[in-house]
Image (cartoon, rainbow, N blue to C red):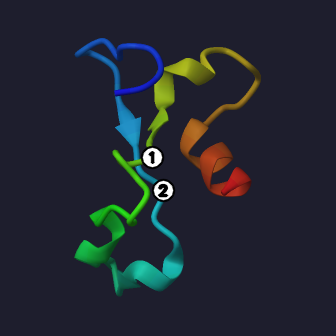
């Protein structure tokens, strides 16, 4: 793991691009590591804190 340790009570979100969705279901390929990767990229929802974003999921989607 790289970065900070995430407390058990907190949440992570993995952004999945629309091309990896089949209807409302996520294809398994969204969780396959690429050749040079050692782990999945996720977003720590609580890290957004009170930075003015009402919904961190919407902000992650906007930035991705």
Q: Is residue 6 left or right of residue 45?
A: left
Q: Residues within 10 Å of mark 2 (few under 14, many from 20)?
A: some
Residue 39 x, y percent position in the rendering: 34, 45
Q: Which residue appears farthest toward the right when viewing the image?
A: 52
Q: Is residue 42 above or below residue 45?
A: below
Q: Is residue 23 left or right of residue 59?
A: left
Q: Which residue is mark 2?
A: 15
Q: Nearer the viewer, residue 48 or 28?
A: 28
Q: Which residue is mark 1?
A: 41
Q: Disc 1 to disc 2, how far (Cα)?
A: 8 Å
Residue 16 x, y percent position in the rendering: 45, 65
Q: Residue at x 67, y 44 (%)?
A: 59
Q: Secondary structure at mark 1?
A: loop
Q: Are marks 1 and 2 in contact (CB under 8 Å)?
A: yes
Q: Residue at x 60, y 37 (%)?
A: 55
- Residue 50, which numbered label? none
Q: Residue at x 45, y 46 (%)?
A: 41
Residue 21 x, y percent position in the rendering: 39, 81
Q: Residues within 10 Å of mark 1 (few under 14, many from 20)?
A: few
Q: Is residue 20 above or below residue 6?
A: below
Quadrant of the rendered image containing residue 23: bottom left
């Amino acid at each position: 793991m790289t970065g900070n340790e995430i407390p058990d009570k907190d949440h992570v979100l993995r952004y999945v691009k629309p091309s990896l969705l089949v209807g409302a279901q996520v294809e398994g390929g969204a969780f396959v590591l690429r050749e040079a990767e050692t782990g999945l990229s996720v977003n720590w929802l609580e890290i957004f804190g009170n930075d003015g974003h009402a919904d961190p999921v919407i902000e992650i989607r906007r930035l991705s």
